[in-house]
Amino acid sequence: MGEFISSIAELMTWIALKLGDFNPFPCFICCSAFKSEREEPLSERLNLRVTKTMKEELSTKDDPPEFCRRAIQEALEKDKEK
């Protein structure tokens, strides 16, 4: 790396230039660039606390966010059936 990086913006720019992508703030930084092929867009965010064990188990899944979305959707549908 050689150069001294003094900010996140400089680091992102350095990475982008080294990778040949001239966008210094790729889509994982900018939430508005998030795209989905879903019938209903994923426009809302949800934060929740879980146990350490739950977090460790979730991290072993191929796509933890999608796993959580499916689990929540299944629970909501089951709740509606009551």
Image (spheres, helix red, strand yellow):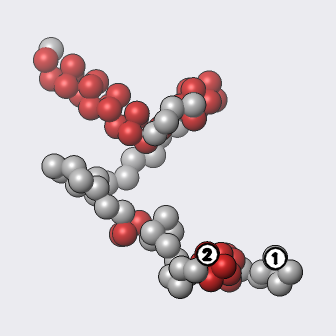
Residue 6 in picture, x, y percent from top left: 77, 82
Image height of 64 relative to 74, above or below? below
Image height of 31 relative to 81, above or below? below
Residue 64 in picture, x, y percent from top left: 47, 38
Work out whether residue 39 can be spotted: yes
**Residue at x 51% of width, y 68% of height:** 29
Neighbours of disc 2 within 10 Å: few (<14), some (14-19), many (20+): few
Q: Quadrant of residue 35?
A: bottom left
**Residue at x 61% of width, y 75% of height:** 19
Neighbours of disc 1 within 10 Å: few (<14), some (14-19), many (20+): few
**Residue at x 15% of width, y 23% of height:** 80
**Residue at x 45% of width, y 69% of height:** 27
Horizontal side, residue 34 vs residue 11: left or right: left
Residue lying furthest left: 81
Q: Quadrant of the N terminus?
A: bottom right
Which mark is on residue 33? none
Residue lying furthest right: 2
Which mark is on residue 1? 1
Q: Quadrant of the C terminus?
A: top left
Horizontal side, residue 32 vs residue 10: left or right: left
The amino acid type found where label 1 is placed reads Met
Mark 2 and mark 1: Cα distance apart in space: 13 Å
Residue 11 in picture, x, y percent from top left: 69, 77
Q: Which residue is mark 2?
A: 19
Which badge, 2 or 1, comes first in the chain's sequence?
Answer: 1
Q: Secondary structure at mark 2?
A: helix
Foreground tag (2 vs 1): 2
